Image (tube, rainbow, N blue to C red):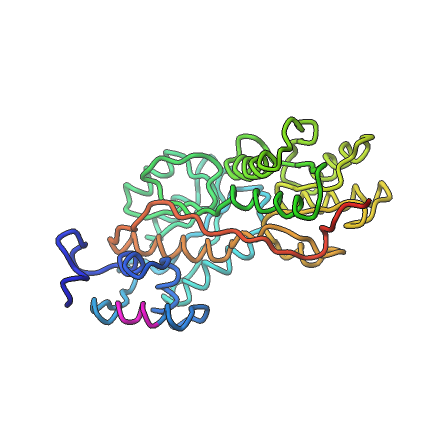
């Protein structure tokens, strides 16, 4: 093995996927795709990763002995549609010939899902729920690794999570509208205690400040991340004499509500009102007109979280405890230059 690749600072064998990703300058999901023969990797990148796999003598490990399931835990009564997350977890489970158990957390004080996960000796927990300290401690006591997807609040440094670049996404949405010529841009954001909502709004505000548009707090309203929340907020905004020419929402469900309020007010999208959402749920492309929105890679977030949980179960230490996957703007037909 070349001395340029391994030094005293390198981790001992067995070499982990994280170390290969770090050395190749790519993400852990990219290395996983190469190892598992999946598409979506550029030929040059694939060749570089395969060369490192061969050089390090990496061999794909199976999951730890004892269990055959991965626990996917959603918050009870949560608003987040989970089909993409379920599909992402199932994708990794199929590769390892594992089952997926879908559970709910938050409403049952008995934490039935937690007792079952321990008794089943689950290989890992992927939580789209914000596990409390007691739940985390119990999982640790029984050596069940867990990863939180899309945390709603700040986590301790030792809690693994997978999120998205919400701040960058919020900025990209506002910049798109500014580039189209909008200056009266309203924001419908979610609850202030939700981490992703704060990040999205901060990114939006940063773009407006860069453009010299400050002091427009009257065009900011907070509502629940639901269709009803978006409709209520937009009904108020659109009734004002200086109504906005564009609205950025906290998620796609709020955007659906904005569409409804705009049509009730006799406004056309995008001719009279431009709208941009966040998440890029399946409903976004089905709206009329199709919604321009910030794509959050929910499926890949689930894949990454599941692979991380299984790696933790094998005793691998990830290169970083928290991973944020990139958001991108999905431009469709709900945003246009403002009417003259």
Secondary structure that dominates the magenta span = helix
Left or right, 81 with reference to 152: right
Q: Residue at x 32, y 58 (%)?
A: 67
Q: Which quadrant of the figure contains the N terminus?
A: bottom left
Task: Indicate the quadrant containing the C terminus: top left, top right, bottom left or bottom right.
Answer: top right
Locate residue 165, reporting x and y percent: 48, 46
Considering every residue shown, the one lying at the far right of the view is 266
Image coords of residue 49 (percent x, y): 31, 67
Is residue 8 shown left or right of residue 156? Answer: left
Picture layout, residue 36 above or below residue 150: below
Asked whether 119 or 89 is in front, the reply is: 89
Which residue is drawn at the image coordinates 55% and 36% (left, top)?
A: 206
**Quarter of the image where one finds residue 47:** bottom left
Count numbered badges in the picture: 0
Residue 154 spot, x, y in % from top left: 43, 34
Query: Which residue is at a point 61% across and 45% down the rendered structure image?
Result: 175
Instruction: Please give left or right for residue 106 compared with residue 285 in the image.
Output: left
**Residue 319 x %, y %:** 29, 50
Q: Is residue 184 above or below residue 23?
A: above
- Residue stretch in magenta: 47-52
In which quarter of the view is residue 110 placed?
top left
In reply to whether residue 102 is colored magenta, the answer given is no
**Between 92 and 2, which is closer to the camera in this rendering?**
2
């Amino acid at each position: 093995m070349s001395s340029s690749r391994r030094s005293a600072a390198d981790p001992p064998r067995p070499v982990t996927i994280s170390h290969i990703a770090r050395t190749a300058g790519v993400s852990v999901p990219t290395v996983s795709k190469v190892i598992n023969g999946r598409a979506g990797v550029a030929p040059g990148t694939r060749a570089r990763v395969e060369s490192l796999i061969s050089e390090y003598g990496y061999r794909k490990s199976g999951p730890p002995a004892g269990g055959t399931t991965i626990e996917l835990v959603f918050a009870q009564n949560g608003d987040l549609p989970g089909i993409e997350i379920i599909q992402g977890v199932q994708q990794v489970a199929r590769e390892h010939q594992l089952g997926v158990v879908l559970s709910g957390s938050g409403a049952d004080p008995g934490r039935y899902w937690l007792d079952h996960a321990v008794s089943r000796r689950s290989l890992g927990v992927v939580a789209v729920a914000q596990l409390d300290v007691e739940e985390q401690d119990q999982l640790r006591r029984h050596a069940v690794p867990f990863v939180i997807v899309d945390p709603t609040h700040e986590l301790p440094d030792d809690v693994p999570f997978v999120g998205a670049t919400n701040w960058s996404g919020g900025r990209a949405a506002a910049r798109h509208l500014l580039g189209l010529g909008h200056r009266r841009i309203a924001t419908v954001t979610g609850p202030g205690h939700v981490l992703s909502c704060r990040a999205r709004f901060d990114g939006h505000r940063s773009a407006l400040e860069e453009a010299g548009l400050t002091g427009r707090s009257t065009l900011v309203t907070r509502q629940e991340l639901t269709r009803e929340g978006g409709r209520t907020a937009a009904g108020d905004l659109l009734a004002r004499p200086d109504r906005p020419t564009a609205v950025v929402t906290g998620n796609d469900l709020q955007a659906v509500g904005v569409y409804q309020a705009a049509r009730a007010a006799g406004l056309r999208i995008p001719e009279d009102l431009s709208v941009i959402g966040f998440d890029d749920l399946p409903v976004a492309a089905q709206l009329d007109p199709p919604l321009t929105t910030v794509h959050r890679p929910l499926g890949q977030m689930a894949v990454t979280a599941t692979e991380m949980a299984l790696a933790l179960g094998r005793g691998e230490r990830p290169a970083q405890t928290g991973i944020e996957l990139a958001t991108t703007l999905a431009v469709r037909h709900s945003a246009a230059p403002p009417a003259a």
